Amino acid sequence: MTGNIDPEKVSNAVNDIAEGGSAAEKWLPRRGGHSGAPLRAILPVDVFGQPADMDAICHIAAAHDLKIIEDSCEALGATYKGNPAGTLGDYGVYAFYPNKQITTGEGAVILTNDDQAANFMRALRNQGRAPGDTWLQHTYLGYNYRLDEMSAALGRVQLTRLQEMVLKRAQVADWYTERLSQISSVEVPQVAGKTTQMSWFVYVVRFAPELDRDAIAQLLGERGIPARPYFLPIHLQPYMVERFGYRTGDYPITEDLGKRSLALPFSSVMTEDQVEQVCQALHLVLCK
Ligand SMILES: Cc1ncc(COP(=O)(O)O)c(C=O)c1O
C-alpha cells in the first residue's frame, strides 16, 4: 500500500455525493463544512514523493465534470507512466520549503494549462491586480502571495540540480530498502508499477500492528537517531475535529497507517555508512 488516495474510494464517494441524501452523508463533514454546494474538485496528494494513481482519478473526474488539483508538493521530479507528477490534473502544486527536494526558502508554484485561471491566480497573488492593472488598481480582492525575486533566483539555480537530488535520494532509499526489507516486522515503502520515477521526499517505514511505533522512535532517539512518527491524519487534527466534527474511526485505513509509520533520517547527503548506522540501531531496538 502506497498511502496514496484510493481511486475506488474516490469513485464511491463521488457517486454517493452525486446521489445525495444518506449515501452522501458518510463522506461529508458532520458539521460546518458542507453548505450544499456541489462537489467541484478532487485533490490527490502525491504522498512522500510517489504520484497518486492519476489515470483512475482523471477518469472519475472526467465522468463527473470535476477539476483535479494535484498536490505534488512532495513529488517534484517524480514521474507517473513517464509524465511529470504535477502536470496530470487541471492544476498542480509544488512547494519549496527547505525540507523539499529543492528549495526557495519559502514559497510554491501552481501549474496549469488554463490561461484564464493562470491570469486569475497571478492577480490573486498580486493583491488582486489583473493583467493590465496599474500598481494602484485592484480588479479583485487579492493577497500578497508573491514569491520574492531572491527566493526565485535561488529556486532557478536549485532547479538545475533537481535530477541530481532525485537520483541521490533514490540511492539513499535503495540503501535503506536493501537492509530493511529483510526484517519481517518492518514494511518498507512500496513503489507502484505506474511510478516510473520516485522522487523520494522522506523514507517512511511501517511496523507490524503489535509493535509500539512511538516507543521505537523513543528508543532510536536515545541512540542518537532522530526518527519522526508520521503522522496524525488530517481529519484528526484539532482544528478539523472542532470545525467539521470528524472522529476517530471515520477513516480507519488512514488512521492505521498514521499509527504505524515512522520517518527515518533521510536526505540527499546521507552516506551508506549513516544508513547502515540507522538500520543497525533499528535492528537492535526491534530485538529488545
Ligand atoms: C503534500 C504537501 N502539501 C502542501 C504542503 C505545504 O507546502 P508549504 O509549506 O509551502 O505551504 C506540503 C509541505 O510540506 C506538503 O508536503
Image: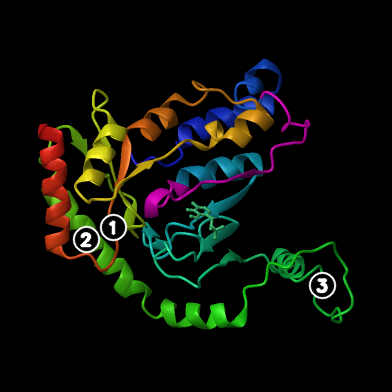
Q: Are marks 2 and 1 in contact (CB under 8 Å)?
A: yes
The residue type indicated by label 1 comes to Phe
Above or below, comparing residue 57 to residue 154 in the picture: above
Query: 10 Å neighbourhood of mark 2: few (<14), some, or many (≥20)?
Result: many
Q: Give the magenta range.
A: 30-54
Image quarter of residue 181: top left
Between tags 3 and 1, which lies in front?
A: 1
Picture coordinates of residue 179 (x, y %)?
11, 49
The answer to whether residue 159 is magenta is no
For label 2, being within 8 Å of ligand 1 is answered: no
The residue type indicated by label 3 comes to Ala
The type of colouring in the image is rainbow
Please name whichever residue, 33 or 197, is drawn nearer the observer in this view of the structure.
33
Picture coordinates of residue 45 (x, y %)?
49, 48
**Which sits earlier in the primary sequence, circle 3 or circle 2?**
3
Looking at the image, residue 193 sits to the left or right of residue 100; the answer is left
Name the residue beneath numbered marker 3.
130
Looking at the image, residue 237 sits to the left or right of residue 54; the answer is right
Q: Secondary structure at mark 3?
A: loop
**Which sits earlier in the primary sequence, circle 2 or circle 1?**
2
